[in-house]
Image (spheres, coloured by chain):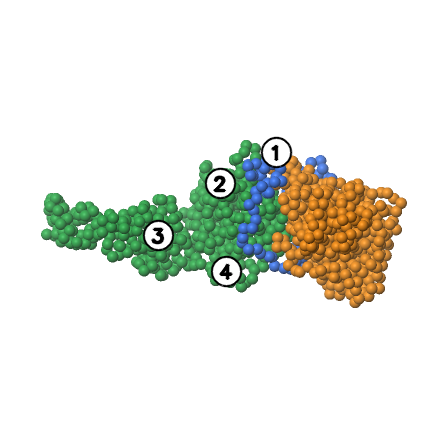
Amino acid sequence: MSEEKNLIEGRTGKWEIILGLEVHAQVISEAKLFSGASTTFGADPNSQVSLVDAAFPGMLPVINKRCVEQAVRTGLGLKAEINLKSVFDRKNYFYADLPAGYQISQYTQPIVGKGTITLDMPDGSKRHVGITRLHLEQDAGKSLHDQHPTKSYIDLNRSGIALMEIVSEPDMRSAEEAAAYLKKLRSILRYLGTCDGNMEEGSMRCDVNVSVRKLGDPLGTRCEIKNVNSIRYVQQAIEYEARRQVEIIEDGGTIRQETRLYDPGKGETRSMRSKEHAHDYRYFPDPDLLPLVLDPNWVSEIKATLPELPDEKRARFVSQYGLSDYDAGVLVGEKETAEYYEAVAKGRDAKLAANWVSSELFGQLNKAGKWITDSPVSAEALGGLIDLIADNTISGRIAKDVFAAMFETGKPAKQIVEEKGLRQVTDTGAIDAAIDDIMAKNADKVAEYRGGKDKLLGFFVGQVMKATGGKANPALLNERLKAKLAG
Amino acid sequence: MSSALPPSELTGLTIAGALDGLAKREFSAVELAQAHLKAMEKHRDLNAYVVETPDKALAMAKASDERRAKGEALGALEGVPLAIKDLFCTDGVQTTAGSHILEGFKPPYESTVTANLWQAGAVMLGKVNMDEFAMGSSNLTSHFGGVTNPWRRKGDNKRLVPGGSSGGSASAVAARMALAATGTDTGGSIRQPAAFTGIVGIKPTYGRCSRWGIVAFASSLDQAGPMARSVKDCAIMLGAMAGHDPKDSTSVDLPVPDYTRALTGDVRGLRVGIPKEYRLDGMSAEIEKLWAQGAEWLKKAGAEIKEISLPHTKYALPTYYIIAPAEASSNLARYDGVRFGLRVPGESLDDMYEKTRAEGFGKEVRRRIMIGTYVLSAGYYDAYYLKAQKLRALIARDFETAFRDVDVILTPSTPSAAFAEGENTDDPVQMYLNDVFTVTVNLAGLPGISVPAGLNAEGLPLGLQLIGRAFDEETLFRVGGVLESSASFTAKPAGY
Amino acid sequence: MSLDSKTVAHIAMLARIKVPEAELPALAKELSGIMTWIEQLNEVDTTGVEPMAGVLHRNLPQREDKVTDGGYADRILLNAPDAAHGFFTVPKVVE
């Protein structure tokens, strides 16, 4: 059931969106699924192609053990069934970037069966989305359509790279849920080290199945939006496509089951001309390969080496560090972030550490467009800053400036504090002198304050703080000021 | 070094004889190659070779002679000149699979089997003709024209087919244009032409020889094997061809025995099965007589003859004609005019594909691709492809059961002797029946050998087939050797 | 099973083999003949029979994850009917 806010308001009533996602995740491996050619991104055209990848006559596939292991690892990470026997099939169709005229894939007997992903919604709620299956298959090559007026160019470097196709149940009901699903899946894959999740480089690609129905009606006809390459586009494509379908149905039309493309420039989906042919993939077991039979002991060994995954880590952060579920969620989104946080929190105030990582650090990283692993401030350096707050060397407020300088220069906190003379003033004499000076300059306001306008306290705090260059210890300043104003 | 033997005698040698002569320095590998190159030139009218590689042959022969002169380690086929079926990819030498669609294709790689042969010291004479993509039983489907069988009917000069698909291999070996040749066998393509041309041919167990670098027809059935003029020659050559290849996931990691040691001549106590279902309605009396004769020879040599039943035999051909075209329809999808071979320009990608494939493939290949596409298509998969897979299981089970009671099975190789172009060749189903005795073996993945056993009334050779247990080629060589010596088949095609 | 011209045209499209309209009926007849012959398989009761895809009862061999191949674009493109700038080319595709 959809929440009210996720329904589309049509002319004839409210419509529910039904979404299922098929994610193609490129397996992290040195060599391709069935050949010894490299998987490195961005090489010269056709330079990372073996005779097998280019489907020369008489060439035969031999499977890469690492790719099998990665699929099993991912299946285990998705808490899914591992099928000890799986079969590789040929999916037959003609296309310019499919050299053999078939893709080696898994059809009726995939390596991984049913599993689950738990989504963390922005409002703090959780959703469970079923995983239907995960199977191993080959990637196709790449067609370039804009290099020549009458020809398309074909580069087979990507041809034969291992992909995991991860198919969800049609369990999602909004673009927001689809986005949360992709974020969570990407996070799990990165934790597992089975896919880098890089959507821009195409190592994670998403096909979205969209249909709409009136609440309580049976499922409608779906359209598949192919190869959407960012989470934002996935959301936009869903919003557009669902509305398109509602409009068609409300205008008395019917939805044609088809493959569509999302055009981010126009914010529209459109029918794919190259997929107009009725497809009949004629799947059959690849006679060049034998059934893949896994040793249950080997699967257990892989299971034993699984890292702590985001959901477990999040729960641990709540219990071990006393963080809120939300804060813990922010920190565990990426494995590197969680590791960074734990390094900062070690031996320090864990909540304070969490605040610094998720607000100041993330804020600066975002602004600079940097990834946590490229942070100019290391976990050790941030820890050093927090230590200076803890031992009253600097105030929390000054610390923010120090952090900004650390981020800019890469210098440690201590050095910046020394160089800029930002050490906190805790000397009562100096603070008293500053207070006296301000009070003398603002005799009228002192009178007003004493006449009962105690809101003016803030004004005096600000003035004195300014006079001390922000370095006065705030607690001490408050205490002395109140005493002097009281006369 | 000058040869003690005239060229015609050099081409008439067996591999074993040639190895002996080379070892004794009676002639050189270069002389042996030259004699064959001369014969190839002389018999070009047979159209057995599609590519002759004289320069390569002489260079390889010279290198072999040098190895011998220097006393280096010698291979099992040192200096032996061979013909290579045009289904084997040969580095830098045109490989077409008998098809227009691959015309001009020069593979930048060498098939594992041929590489093994060169490693064993063999010399390449050229590439031999074949039915297009190994689909045929007459060699008439080749884009490069039919091949002529060197045999003629008595008193009749009509040109006969050598069988197929390894028709060029068979003709070249029978006409003394090679000491031996490679063949491939998907439904009978080694054994049927061997029988038609009076030579020996063995299809080893599926997985024995690597399929890497052999143009695929039907991957679950294809297997390479030798074709030669004696059982022993086949044993020598198979030993060099076979072996585990990590590049082929279906190549089996088992040691290759010295097959020549299996030729003991001793079949005493061996149980030979005669499958009653192979006695076809309307089977020619000559074939039936030869079959009985074969059993008699083995019995005389001390073997025990037992009638057995292979109840699903009659379904083997229709089963094959689902499975092989299905796999072929997919295997041949790569011939699309993009990366190699023929391209016929088109207005769109699909137009280019359709024109290229219509022009590049011959009629029989197009027919089989269509059948294969149909039996795999939505709504028909279960009725045809899945049904055929189940029949295949039953056929394999028939053999498993039979091999509990017998050690080897004796059958005719073919239902008839060689025929002429125009006879028997119009109706595709009639043509498919040529493989009726051989195709079961491919479906079950077993080894089968055809040994020439006699001549029919018209003076044409006929063969007997032996079927063995998986990976028991040795028994086939042992029994084949006894059949060979019992038949003492010494007939040669006139003029060769 | 009798195949009609429409079915044959569809199969030809799937197989990407151009068949002139005029040849469809004859081809349909020929293929129907073969399919009818094939259908004798229906005589056999195959209930409960496990379909057999291949003859080897072995495990799929797996190779190590090492780069051992590729790096020879020239060899890959050597036989191409129309290569340009290191790419294969095809008539322009509109997606």
Q: Quadrant of residue B265?
A: bottom right
**Residue A461 visible within the image:** yes
Residue name at image x 51 percent, y 41 percent: A261
Q: Which residue is mark 4?
A: A302
The residue positioned 66% from the left and 56% from the top of the image is B243
The subunit carrying tag 2 is: A
Residue B124's disc is: none
Query: In front of the other: label 4 or label 1?
Result: 4
Estimate the spatial distance between the alpha carbons at disc 1 and disc 3, rounded to whole Å: 59 Å
Side of A413 where A251 appears, left or right: right
Q: CA distance from mark 2 to mark 1?
A: 27 Å
**Mark 2 and mark 3 in contact (Cβ < 8 Å)?**
no
| Camera-nearest label, 2 or 1 | 1
Answer yes or no: do the residues labelled 4 and 3 have beta carbons within 8 Å? Answer: no
The residue wearing badge 3 is A378
User: Is the C-beta separation of discs 1 and 3 under 8 Å?
Assistant: no
- Numbered disc 4: secondary structure: helix
**Chain B is shown in which shade?**
orange
Q: Residue furthest bottom?
A: B269
Q: Which residue matches tag 1?
A: B347
Amino acid on which the number 4 mark rests in the picture: Ile
Which residue has dot 2 on it? A262
